[in-house]
Amino acid sequence: MKISQMLSSDLMFTNINTQPDKHPIFFYKGGINNDVVAKMKNLIDTKLKTTHQIHYKTRSILLELAQNIMSYSVEYNALDGEERVGLLALDETKDTFVFLTGNLINTQNQATLLAHAADINARDQKGLADLKLSLIKDNLMQKTKRAGIGLVQVAILSENGYQLKIKSINAQYAYLTIAVTIFKNS
């Protein structure tokens, strides 16, 4: 089954592979930990036939997106109660690689995430670098670790921003979906 069949068509992700004989590079829903991420990195190493620069971007974006789930998903693995749960997928089209992630968030974070995404996607590369530097300085002053920097780094690496959709589940939870497109010719 293709990713496009697994996800609702209203999620605005039209770049997903539609060739029936093609499968995603990986599609994983479950507990996200370092071992899972290492296996995904190995799949990128073995299955992506591309330039060194695109290979680096793809691996780096995977790490940022996985870290995002490991830090912010409010769904936990029922077996250990510590490991956070999310969806990570990578697909390939003729001209692009497309990452999809999904995880549960608290509804109270929706407005902040939407505003952050709009700010990031409105900036050029210099604006993104300035935002990243500003966030690093803020984090140092507040003694926090990387809060808000991961998605800025994703936008810098992809050179294409990202798409974000939040679908409310109930008053407490919403489902966050992020799509990142990496053009092979960039």
Image (cartoon, rainbow, N blue to C red):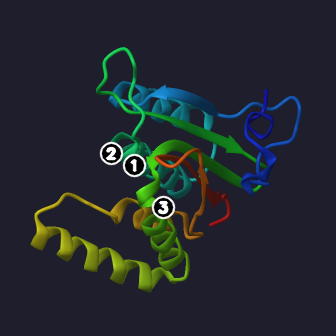
Question: Foreground residue, 92 or 78?
Answer: 78
Viewer-side residue, 171 vs 20:
171
Query: Is there CB contact under 8 Å for labels 1 and 2?
Result: yes
- In the image, 16 versus 39, the foreground residue is 16
Closer to us: 101 or 182: 101
Q: Residue, x 56% and y 31% (percent of image)?
A: 46
| Residue furthest out toward the front | 171
Q: Real-space Cα distance between discs 1 and 3? A: 15 Å
Please tell me how crowded label 2 is: few (under 14), some (14-19), or many (20+) other residues with Cα within 10 Å: few
Residue picked out by circle 3: 110
Task: Residue type at mark 2: give it.
Answer: Ser
Q: Secondary structure at mark 2?
A: helix
Q: Is residue 64 left or right of residue 165?
A: left
- Residue 32's x, y, as percent? 41, 31
Q: How many marks?
A: 3
Residue at the image position 36 percent from the left and 25 percent from the top: 35
**Residue 30 % position (x, y):** 49, 26
> What residue is pinned by disc 2?
71
Residue to which mark 1 is pinned: 68
Q: Tell me, yes or no, whether the two marked residues, 1 and 3, touch with CB atoms within 8 Å.
A: no
Disc nearer the start of the sequence (3/2): 2
Position of the N terminus by quadrant: top right
Residue 180 image position (x, y, % from top left) = 59, 57
Identify the mark at residue 18; answer none if there is no mark. none
Residue 10 picture location, percent across and down: 78, 52
